[in-house]
Image (cartoon, helix red, strand yellow):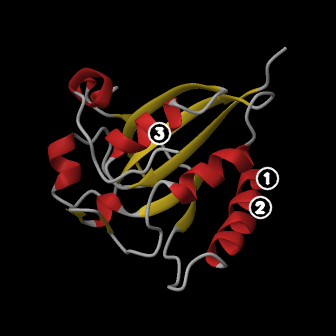
Amino acid sequence: MSKIETATFAAGCFWGVEAAFRDVPGVLDAVSGYTGGHTEHPTYREVCSDTTGHAEAVQVTYDADRVSYDELLHRFWEMHDPTTPNRQGPDVGSQYRSAIFVHTPEQRERAEASLHEAQRNHSHPIVTRIEDATTFYPAEEYHQRYFEKHGAACHVTKH
């Protein structure tokens, strides 16, 4: 029987983050959305105003028997620049911050260990925040599977 778990990451524009996680074997679903803010049921326009406190994030549902949380963390560090505060590529604002939203104490422990390991590979300080997961609001339908629908590209590096 599969062990289904949830992980949530923010690494800039959620379109590329979602697409990158969808490519990971063992990931069952990746949903673009908003988390970490103070407004209930925020819209894209509200989040882009940089006033709700939300990050554009991706909630990943995965089979822990096929892919580990550590592997998802490894992919997270590879797909963006965790040393740039509130910015990824051309996207600027706190909604584009680098963050790991942890769902369990074990995830927090693994995320903190991976941050320390990632710091060894960067000459500048990592600004990624590790926060407790809060309510995740799926983004509007037109944001889901955006790259599959439109073939667009963004800053995220797919490995």
Counting from the top left corner in percent of width and height, residue 80 is at 44, 59
Counting from the top left corner in percent of width and height, residue 154 is at 28, 48
Q: Give, as a three-letter code, the residue at label 3.
A: Ala
Q: Residue at x 70, y 74 (%)?
A: 116
Tell me which corner region of the image, top left, top right, bottom left or bottom right, holds residue 141: top left
Q: Give, as a three-letter code, the residue at label 2.
A: Glu
Cβ atoms under marks 1 and 2 closer than 8 Å: yes
User: Looking at the image, which residue sits at the far top?
Assistant: 1
Q: Give, as a three-letter code, the residue at label 1.
A: Glu
Cβ atoms under marks 3 and 2 closer than 8 Å: no
Residue 72, numbered label: none
Q: Which residue is mark 1?
A: 106
Q: Earlier in the sequence, mark 1 or mark 3?
A: 3
Counting other residues with Cα less than 10 Å from the Cα at mark 2, is it few (<14), some (14-19), or many (20 or more)? few
- The answer to which of 97 and 119 lies nearer the viewer is 119
Give the number of callouts: 3
**Mark 3 and mark 2: span between their CA atoms?**
24 Å
Residue 144 can be seen, yes or no: no
Counting other residues with Cα less than 10 Å from the Cα at mark 1, is it few (<14), some (14-19), or many (20 or more)? few
**Mark 1 and mark 2: span between their CA atoms?**
5 Å
Q: Residue at x 79, y 19 (%)?
A: 2
Counting other residues with Cα less than 10 Å from the Cα at mark 3, is it few (<14), some (14-19), or many (20 or more)? some
Counting from the top left corner in percent of width and height, residue 103 is at 65, 46
Q: Which residue is mark 3?
A: 20
Q: Earlier in the sequence, mark 3 or mark 2?
A: 3
Residue 109, numbered label: 2
Placement of the N terminus among the 4 image quadrants: top right
Counting from the top left corner in percent of width and height, residue 64 is at 76, 32
Label 3 vs label 2, nearer the camera:
3
